[in-house]
Image: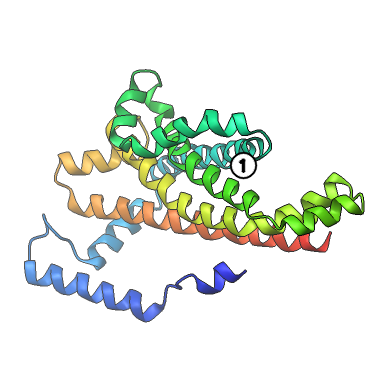
Amino acid sequence: MKNRKNSPKIRLWAVCFWLTVWQLGSMALNQKLLLVSPLQVLIRLSRLAPTAAFWSTVSFSFLRIAAGFFSAAFLGSLLAALSARFCRVMELLAPLMLAIKSVPVASFIILALLWCPSRNLSVLISFLMVLPVIYTNVLEGIGASDRQLLEMAQVFAAAPRQIILSIYLPQIFPYFRAACGTALGLCWKSGIAAEVIGLPTGSIGERLQQAKVYLDTPDLFAWTLVVVLLSLSFGRLFLFLLDQLALRLELV
């Protein structure tokens, strides 16, 4: 809960300020090809949104990027638990996690195209970008667990389920939540980048690439806005549900 209080909030006045800067920049430049106004982007988006093709494209990218995120969140947490329990597992995974964090996203995308069909490329890339973030933070959270509480639980012969729910989860949760907050942005950036390079049919990345090729700046800004809105909405909803789950576990 402390992480939520310390996290910066998006204020309406700040949004209006930057929209005004954007509008003034567009008016000063007076080049629609280079920078369209916020109003032009909203008009273009309002024309795209009612179409079935728009929602098909949105669902195509959303489902794949979300699948990559959830897969990485689950496997990263599981591997962190195994690493905390078995030292050899931690030693085995250390070079792999370092390599994943060090290799540029573009290199991963190009290499993945040799093995993975472009249709599912965003799933793999999102998974790879999220995995080390979740793994590292959860492992750190397990390591930071209060040893005195664990010793007390052993003295009173507490059940493993009670130890997990009452000791481990409350202390790991802030680390896991912080990791998810960071990973949610990474998975969308890397997933869309994978689509822009791989060009799977029916994806947001394909629409962005088409807008660039045809110099359709309103379309480019409109689809970029769609990605931002999807990332923010998905992130806020997931973290809200995560907080609600944490509150319910506290009552168990």
Report the residue at 25% width, 67% height from top.
39
- Residue at the far right: name it: 156
- Residue at the far bottom: name it: 13
Q: Amino acid at mark 1?
A: Ser
Where residue 143 sits: x, y (%)?
63, 50
Report the residue at 28% width, 35% height from top.
106
Where residue 83 sits: x, y (%)?
62, 36
Counting every numbered tag in the picture gives 1
**In the image, is 237 to the left or to the right of 188?**
right
Asked if one can make out residue 116 in the rendered structure from this viewpoint, the answer is yes
**In the image, is 163 to the left or to the right of 121?**
right
Give the quadrant of the C terminus. Answer: bottom right
Report the residue at 27% width, 43% height from top.
208
Where residue 216 sits: x, y (%)?
17, 48
Examine the rendered structure and indicate whether residue 134 appears above or below residue 128: below
Residue 61 figure quarter: top left
Report the residue at 64% width, 56% height from top.
173
Give the quadrant of the N terminus. Answer: bottom right
Which residue is under mark 1?
A: 77
- Crowd tier of the residue under label 1, counting other residues whose Cα lies within 10 Å: few below 14, some 14–19, many 20 or above: many
**In the image, is 213 to the left or to the right of 47?**
left
Q: Nearer the viewer, residue 221 or 116?
A: 116
Regarding mark 1 in the picture, which secondary structure is present there? helix
Q: Nearer the viewer, residue 99 or 128?
A: 99
Q: Nearer the viewer, residue 60 or 190?
A: 190
